[in-house]
Image: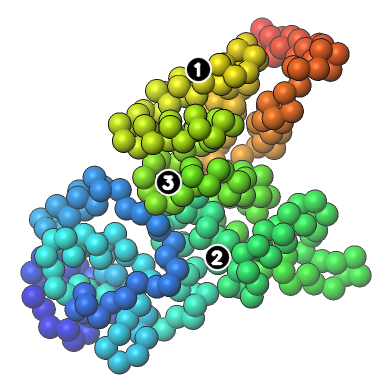
Amino acid sequence: MASSQETTTTSVTAGEEQMTDSWQWLPLAQIEFPEYQVRKALEPEALQRLVETIATHGMLEPLVVRRLDEGRYELVAGWRRYSAAQQAGWQRVPACVRELSDAAALELALQENLVREELNPLEETDGILRLLAVKLEMDVDGVISLLYAMRNQKLGSTRRNGSPNWQVEVVESVFAPLRLSWKSFVETRLPLLKLPEDVLAALREGKIAYTKAKAIAKLSDEENRRVLLAEAMEKGLSLSQIRARVRSLREETEDGEVAAAVEASEEVAEEVAGEESASAEVPQPVVRLQAAARRIHQAKLWQDPQRWQQAERLLEQLEALVAEVEGDA
């Protein structure tokens, strides 16, 4: 094991130092976790694979920390690497020590995790909101209100009198390097915070995958949702199994045909949105279709014969239009 003095070599293996940045060996005991962490949970299987990699090949990248005071450091980036080194029995780890403000530290942590695609959508949402809160110097609720105001009032980077709207500029600067725009974030990510509390808690604690949590949340009956959530976590139900159970439970309490149609429309919209989000923001038509299906379900439109008849005529027109497009393809 190398000394704790600063090194500038090019990589780090289990007993050798090699890195591309200035770094030093620091005792694990001197590195503390920040008050707010971007990641909320680690998947045991993924962590174990990283432990094996570190044990065999060493740590390919150093942690990033910032100095708190003499002999104390705060972890900025590399929570998985820290945890894996700890499990592998390392007493010291390679780390880059940087001078960072609260906002800069949070931004770096968020960017690293986004680049590595290690965050689930809820962790990403929480992290972005926290970063905006620090940069805007307001609480998270205030940030959410601002984002909705920007969407509803279609605020731009300037006010009507031509003076800069600094809050809008801050929001746009935060989203500029990210994979999604602030508009897409409002439409597709903020609704995650409205998931039922039991589902939200399980998701934040890493007890269930995001896609499974979102499927379970479609159950409006609290008892059915609680039972299915517990079963999904205990038995490790697959997403297809959960969707089948949700569909069955919804059909027991709702009009079966309508419930199945709404479920299918939601799944299609989610699949399309998932394909698009990898390279760009979710197209507005997809967002609108998904929102419309959800609102039809929540309003139980089929219970009003006259309005449902009108809706059916519109659906028939939409189906005919889709059939026409498919025929031209």
Residue 135 marker: none
What element does badge 1 sit on? helix
Mark pair 3, 1: CA separation? 23 Å
Say left or right for 24 vs 262. Answer: left
Q: Residue furthest front?
A: 223
Q: Residues within 10 Å of mark 2 (few under 14, many from 20)?
A: many
Q: Amino acid at mark 2?
A: Arg
Which residue is identified by label 1?
248
* Residue closest to the eye, 1 or 124: 124
Residue lying furthest right: 161
Please name the amino acid that badge 3 sits on.
Ala
Q: Residue at x 69, y 33 (%)?
A: 291
Q: Residue at x 76, y 52 (%)?
A: 151
Give the residue at x 47% y 54%.
Answer: 123
Q: Secondary structure at mark 3?
A: helix
Residue 169 visible in rendering: no
Could you tell me which quadrant the N terminus lies in?
bottom left
The residue wearing badge 2 is: 130
The answer to the question of whether label 3 and label 1 lie on touching residues, with beta carbons closer than 8 A, is no
Foreground of the two, 204 or 179 = 204
Q: Earlier in the sequence, mark 3 or mark 1?
A: 3
Measured as percent of width and height from the top left, residue 211 is found at 46, 36
Q: Which mark is residue 202?
A: 3
Residue 318, placed above or below residue 159: above
Q: Bin the neighbour count of mark 3 within 10 Å (Cα to Cα): few under 14, some 14-19, many 20 and up.
A: some
